[in-house]
Amino acid sequence: MADIVYETDEPVLYRAENGVAWITMNRPTFNNAQNSQMTYALDDAFRRAVDDDEVKAIVLAGTGKHFSAGHDIGTPGRDVTKTFDRKLLWPDHVNKPGAEFLYTREQEVYLGMCRRWREMPKPTVAMVQGACIAGGLMLAWVCDLIVASDDAFFQDPVVRMGIPGVEYFAHAFELPPRIAKEFLLLGERMPVQRAYDLGMVNRIVTRDELEGETRKVAEKLAEMPRLGLSLTKQAINHVEDLRGKRTAMDAVFHMHHFAHAQNDLVTGNSLAGLTGKAMAEANKKDAKEG
């Protein structure tokens, strides 16, 4: 049980204008690392946007240099041991022993919430700058469109922890299978141009142009009929699920938690003793050598 110190009471900012809800992660000091405080705030913001009939499209953004450095595994605001008002029909995790602790928590805050967000009836646009790493991928991938700056990069380096990718395992649907293997097994940064060439990103612009281009895309969506937007989104999501996206994700989620349990047994730590700082240092070293 660690002391939890939040650096902000507003981990997510919300505004709506011209038919578009702008939902912005607001932990720039920690590169928008996702703790539960932020995750539940994101869920509340998405609910607010869905409930507002004036909102036709949603933008997900991040303040500061980076879109998101992933799940919070080392800031003072890491709140994995804290109880929150849950959104799904899973019990509280904090009193669960052993592997059940993380398994129960991540069914709610990672797999379950990301699926909820993917299935929102309103189209979503991720506005990505800088790093989009591990848990950051999950947030970008649940969005229908991705507009990225030319300095953006994408990465899932968690094989370093012995874990086969993040919980919302969409890798082999966002990327061709052999590229997905490279992405995970080597854990290297994927430059935005390659992500665009592979179909993971819709548009690339300069950092200065990023908000303007995202606004243009979102406001064009907001001009379309609400039901038409919803049905089109459901249609494409349905095709993905017919191809096995949901069942594949279920299977890999259990592999993910087998890896956590193995780490606990072998090292006494579900992340194999690696911290956010250690992962960042290894990441920078690999990028420099590459």
Image (tube, rainbow, N blue to C red):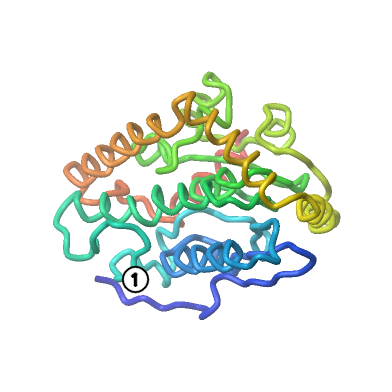
Task: Judge whether 209 appears above or below 35 on screen.
Answer: above
Q: Tell me the quarter of the image containing the C terminus.
A: top right
- Label 1 belongs to which residue? 85
- Left or right, 278 with respect to 263, comes to right
Q: Quadrant of residue 198?
A: top right
Q: In terms of secondary structure, where does tag 1 sit?
A: loop
- Left or right, 176 with respect to 216, comes to left
Q: Quadrant of residue 90?
A: bottom left
Q: Nearer the viewer, residue 270 or 92?
A: 92
Task: Judge whether 1 appears above or below 225 on screen.
Answer: below
Q: Nearer the viewer, residue 34 or 236?
A: 236
- Asked whether residue 146 is in view, the answer is yes
Q: Amino acid at mark 1?
A: Asp
Q: Position of residue 144 (x, y in %)?
A: 64, 43
| Residue drawn at the location 36% of the way across and 76% of the way down | 4
- Asked whether residue 130 is in view, the answer is no
Q: Tell me the quarter of the image containing the N terminus.
A: bottom left
Q: Nearer the viewer, residue 190 or 135?
A: 135
Q: Position of residue 179 (x, y in %)?
A: 56, 23
Q: Position of residue 201 (x, y in %)?
A: 70, 38
Task: Judge whether 2 appears above or below 58 on screen.
Answer: below
- Figure label count: 1
- Left or right, 180 with respect to 250, comes to right
Q: Residues within 10 Å of mark 1 (few under 14, many from 20)?
A: few
Q: Nearer the viewer, residue 8 or 169?
A: 169
| Residue drawn at the location 30% of the way across and 46% of the way down | 272
